[in-house]
Amino acid sequence: MERFGMDFNTTPGRLNFYNIHPFDVLMDAIKNPAGAAERCQFVGQIETRGKKYLMVQARGDRDDGFIEAMGAALAGHFDHYICQIHSVYPGEPKGRAPNLVRAALIEDGVEDERITLKRDLADAVDTLLRMGSAGDLLVFAPGTGRPKSRVWDQILAFESDTGAD
C-alpha cells in the first residue's frame, strides 16, 4: 500500500492529479448526478489561487432527466464549463447531451457566456488547457474507456508544448 499512488497508471481516470503545468489538473470520471454532486463537493474543498474550470462529457444514451440532473448538480461550482459530446456514447441527435447539460446549467444560474459546447474531444481538451492560467484548477471528466486515455495523453503532451520540464 505504501507504493500506491493516485496516478493514471494505478487508477486511470479516477482522481488523477497532474501538477506540472502552471495550473493544476484533475481528471476524474463523472458518471451520474450523485457522482457529479460528490465531485463538486470534493473540488470545492481544493484551495486554488485562480479559477476552477470543468470539461464534462455526458453520455447521450441516457434519458433527458438523467442528463439534466447531472448538469444541475454541476451548476455553480466552476467558473467555466466545457460540455463535450461523448465520443463512445454520443446519442441522437449528436448534440443532445451537451445541450441538455448546458440548459440545466443555465436554468440553475450559470451565465451562457460561461459555457462552451464542443463536438470534438481533442478540441475540448485543448480549449480547456489553453484557458488555464497560473493558480487555476482544470477538471477533466471524460467518458470511460478510450476517451480518458486520449485526454490524459493530451494533457501530458501539452506539457511539452509549454516548454516545461
Image (spheres, rainbow, N blue to C red):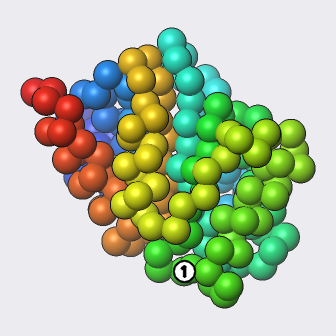
| Residue at position x 66%, y 65% in the image | 98
Q: Is residue 24 visible?
A: yes
- Place residue 75 in its image quadrant: top right
| Residue at position x 71%, y 41% in the image | 113
Q: Is residue 78 left or right of residue 159?
A: right
Query: Which residue of the protein is positioned furthest toward the left in this rendering?
Result: 165
- Place residue 108 in its image quadrant: top right
Q: Picture coordinates of residue 46 (x, y %)?
A: 54, 23
Q: Nearer the viewer, residue 158 or 71?
A: 158
Q: Picture coordinates of residue 3 (x, y %)?
A: 20, 37
The residue pinned by badge 1 equals 89
Q: Secondary structure at mark 1?
A: loop
Q: Is residue 30 left or right of residue 115?
A: left
Q: Nearer the viewer, residue 140 or 12?
A: 140
Query: Which residue of the protein is positioned furthest toward the top in this rendering?
Result: 49
The amino acid beneath tag 1 is Tyr
Q: Picture coordinates of residue 65 (x, y %)?
A: 84, 70
The N terminus lies in which quarter of the figure? top left
| Residue at position x 43%, y 64% in the image | 121
